[in-house]
Image (tube, helix red, strand yellow):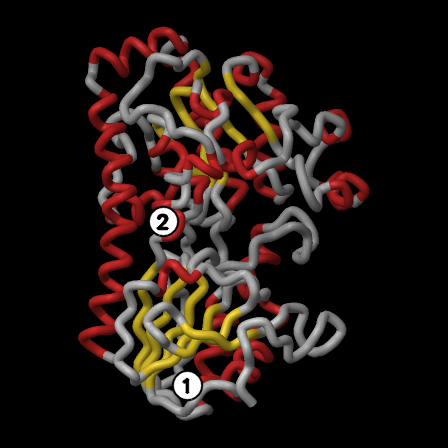
Amino acid sequence: MELSTDTKIFDYDSLLTVSIQKSKTVTDIDIISTCHINNRIYMNFENTGTYNIIDYQGVGEVDICNYTKLALLHLSEKENIIISNPTEALNSVYWNSVFYILQEAGYKNILWIDGGLTKGELFRHIDILNITHIFSGFFFRNLFRPDIFGEMPTSGDIANKNKLFVCISRLARQERFYFTSKILKDIDLYEKGILSCAWGDNTIDVFEDKNLNLLLEQDIINKFPISLNHEETEESVTGFYEEFTSAIFHIVQESSVGYDPRTHRKTYSKLPIDWRIVNSDRLFFTEKSAKPFCCNQIPLFVAAPGYVEMLRKLGFDVFDDIIDHTYDKEDNVFNRCDLVFKELKRISEMHTTEEWLKFLESNYISERFVKNRERLMEINEEQENKSATWIRENF
């Protein structure tokens, strides 16, 4: 059965919670997607006539297997296929399920594009497929959209810096609660920064959950949610409000808490294993990490272990001469939060905000900010070119 671009196979109450559609890219390649598709990433993909595309934007973990099986029913038989989700880095166990389905369907070669900087663990029994992974450059260019996120600060500009640090997070997660609570307990540090945590959509139920008492004292719980008191728009969540850009240091609370939940939950979680966790075993670069590079700031990361090292390998200046990133080697997420907090505290006691600003000026740090932003855009172009080149040479 051929599907038009707006034909639904199943509605919400059927097997899938998303709509599925068959269409073509601008280069006339057959593609299965949901209505959430961002077609721009495929515009440079040459149509060799030897592959199909399944786009997983908007497809959650619960749907991923059935979505793949249904997609295959409406694609012609070919040896090659591209599977893509440029905005997510799902746990490798889900992608491995997809790989197994594609292997059973007779595919030989897969180009896998998603937001993960690392692949995770590939199942040993998938030995027929040739799988190539290329990470998407989506979040490396995403903030360069003034129509959505507002005007980005001038590259290298530090004139408006008047706060020591900014530490913002919207959705409630256990490590974010934990790290933010440490700042709340330190009044002197708190007054030097900009703080938000656990505000916005899907957070009200968190404060009705008694499990939160296992993580925080009652007097601290009562201080959440912490909001910057602005509308919940794309610009306010991920854009360039003055609050975000006026700090010298930026504590990035990235999406992955840095452990594989299949093996580490019972060891490292202070809460029940299903409470507000991130189910990815992979490193994931999002707009949270891009923001300090766009806002002329020095970053610290509450992220997966090894994340800072990956940024170094990508060519970013993580200011090792200023920041002690040894926390990056700590596997326990709570211990890692403790180490990041210790480093933030050291920074706050080393110089006043005014003294840090003079330090930036006298040591030409602005030039390093400019290079980081340039590298952000270079990576986007490199990844898009890499995908198009790989397809041309292999498909």
Residue at horizontal 51 percent and vertical 59 percent from the top: 280
Residue at horizontal 49 percent and vertical 55 percent from the top: 259
Q: Nearer the viewer, residue 265 or 112?
A: 112
Q: Which residue is mark 2?
A: 306
Residue at horizontal 62 percent and vertical 29 percent from the top: 181
User: Which quadrant is home to the C terminus?
Assistant: bottom left
Q: Nearer the viewer, residue 343 or 245?
A: 245
Rendered location of residue 305, percent (x, y): 41, 48
Rendered location of residue 56, percent (x, y): 50, 68
Are there few (<14), some (14-19), or many (20+) residues within 10 Å of tag 2?
some
Q: Is residue 386 left or right of residue 8?
A: left
Number of numbered markers:
2
Note whether 218 is above or below 59 in the view shown. Answer: above
Instruction: Evaluate if marks 2 and 1 touch, with contact meaning CB atoms under 8 Å apart.
Output: no
Are there few (<14), some (14-19), or many (20+) residues within 10 Å of tag 1?
few
Q: Which residue is mark 1?
A: 125
